[in-house]
Image (cartoon, helix red, strand yellow):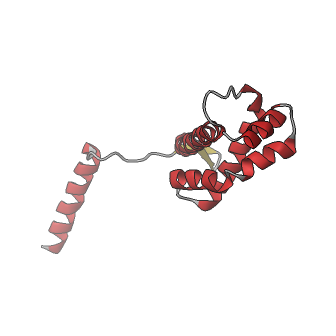
Amino acid sequence: MSEFEKILLEKARKGDVDAFEMLIREHERKAFNIAYRFLKNADDAEDITQEAFLRAFRSIKKFKGQSSFSTWLYRIINNTCIDFVRAKQNKITDSIDKTIQYDNEELELQIPGDQNDPVDMAETAEISQLMQSMLA
């Protein structure tokens, strides 16, 4: 870590927003690239990068200097990406499990599994027999 970076870091720990912004500017491009490689979406990567910078600013006082600032920052970006993906997966799961109101009734979305349902197989066989007899 350069002497200049140490000074900026110390000022940022004391709440100096300008010093923090100067620290971040050096890492903006790489931070975005890390998020983009993880998320494969530029808009999401931009949002996550900004969120990670906010998290870093809020917790800069906890930075102990045992690693470089960039290592610490990139870990925050990585963790923010993981949190985003988990939240997105949970949102998808929640939307599948919810019931829908239709004509004053609660309907539950049912997604068929990979295995064949015996009732469906029987109905398919019955329809097939009916069609065979109608064609004969």
Looking at the picture, how far across and down is residue 29, in whole percent? 64, 57
In terms of image quadrants, where is residue 65? top right
Measuring 72% from the left and 44% from the top, which residue is drawn there?
53
Measuring 52% from the left and 57% from the top, which residue is drawn there?
40
Q: Is residue 42 left or right of residue 16?
A: left
Looking at the picture, how far across and down is residue 35, in whole percent? 58, 51
User: Looking at the image, which is closer to me, 88 or 74?
Assistant: 74
User: Looking at the image, which is closer to me, 32 or 91?
Assistant: 32
In terms of image quadrants, where is residue 105? top right
Asked if one can make out residue 78 in the rendered structure from this viewpoint, the answer is: yes
Q: Is residue 126 left or right of residue 6?
A: left
Measuring 65% from the left and 49% from the top, which residue is drawn there?
48
Residue 38's place in the image compared with 3, above or below, is below
Q: Quadrant of the N terminus?
A: top right
Q: Residue furthest left?
A: 136
Residue 37's place in the image compared with 81, above or below, is below
Residue 8's place in the image compared with 131, above or below, is above
User: Looking at the image, which is closer to me, 109 or 73?
Assistant: 73
User: Looking at the image, which is closer to me, 82 or 18?
Assistant: 18
Q: Residue furthest bottom?
A: 135
Looking at the picture, how far across and down is residue 91, in whole percent? 58, 43
Q: Is residue 81 left or right of residue 3?
A: left
Tally of numbered discs: 0
Q: Quadrant of the C terminus?
A: bottom left
